[in-house]
Amino acid sequence: MTRYAVRHATVYEYGGEVSHSHHLLHLKPRDFVFQRCLGHTLVLDPPPKIVREDIDAFGNAIARLEYDRAHDSLAVTADMQVDVIPRVADSLESEPWETVRSRLSYHAVPLAQMDLEACRFRMRSSHVLLKRVFEDYARECFARNRTIAAASKELMSKIHREFKYSPGSTNNRTSVVDVLNRRRGVCQDFAHLMIACLRSFGLSARYVSGYIRTVRRDGETAVGGDASHAWVSVYCPPLGWLDFDPTNDCLVSEDHITLGWGRDFGDVSPLRGVIVGGRRNKLKVDVRVQPL
């Protein structure tokens, strides 16, 4: 088990007065079998009129903010302490990918609870398209009767090998088709691409938002450290959900801290909102991940 202290600081400078705004935060680490959130605090400057904590449709902790007084900047600092528990990944002996696709397909009979939950992450979403071009790109990874875990691992490695990590080359509006054509992007793009490939094969994959320690336990420097990070969770029965990091070509374990998961980035963006007023916005984000 590894304990981490994480600080995620975000500053918006609006370039003018904002008279009213609403914000949605995904900045509290999720509790699940491989992780426990020990502490979490939010510092907000200026203080909002309303802060309401809630749980979203995917079980992630969220905070809703409302401002009704003029302000020209917003600073949000989240401090958290998390225990991350090792995941056993010695075996990738899951079901063949064709079997998983079949069990998630419609057969006019009730689905098992885990299969039904997995189907939420099988369809097209705002940032993830279902197209033959993604199926064609990943086809060599999905040999007949290959286990879904082994196929996903090869797809992860293929993306890592064939795409260049290039900060600034994409933004939140860049389509996953453009990422495939340009062969460059950042962790968010690689996660969306891998999910698009898996869902285009009729499989279930979810987008995971979180952090990665800068220097991994194996001594390698992580790509995407000191920033928000993203990876992919694939439904691999009977093993459950297995997490793959195409940016670093590794299975997720103690080096990764999970904030939450959803269908794509739009479901678990760390901070987003709607403002009335302002001019040219400037954004600064600083992330620190410290093993304790």
Image: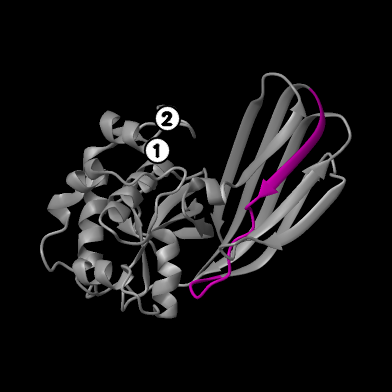
The answer to whether 203 is drawn above or below residue 156 in the figure is below
Q: Amino acid at mark 1?
A: Val
Q: Quadrant of residue 108?
A: bottom left
Seen at 28% across and 52% down, the residue is 200
Label 2 secondary element? loop
Label 1 secondary element? loop
Span of residues in magenta: 17-35
Which percent across, then down, holds residue 177?
32, 35
User: Left or right of 180: which side holds 285?
Assistant: right
Mark 1 crowd level (few <14, some 14–19, many ≥20, 10 Å Cα):
many
Instruction: Tell me how far mark 1 sits from mark 2, CA to CA.
Output: 7 Å
* Residue 12 visible in the shown view: yes
Seen at 75% across and 41% down, the residue is 22
Whether pointer 1 and pointer 2 mark residues with C-beta atoms closer than 8 Å, the reply is yes
* Residue 216 visible in the shown view: no
- The front one of 112 and 47 is 112
Q: Which residue is mark 2?
A: 170
- The front one of 218 and 250 is 250
Mark 2 crowd level (few <14, some 14–19, many ≥20, 10 Å Cα):
some
Whether residue 268 appears in magenta in the rendering, the answer is no
Q: Which residue is mark 1?
A: 186
Seen at 69% across and 32% down, the residue is 12
- The front one of 240 and 167 is 240
User: Left or right of 167: which side holds 154?
Assistant: left
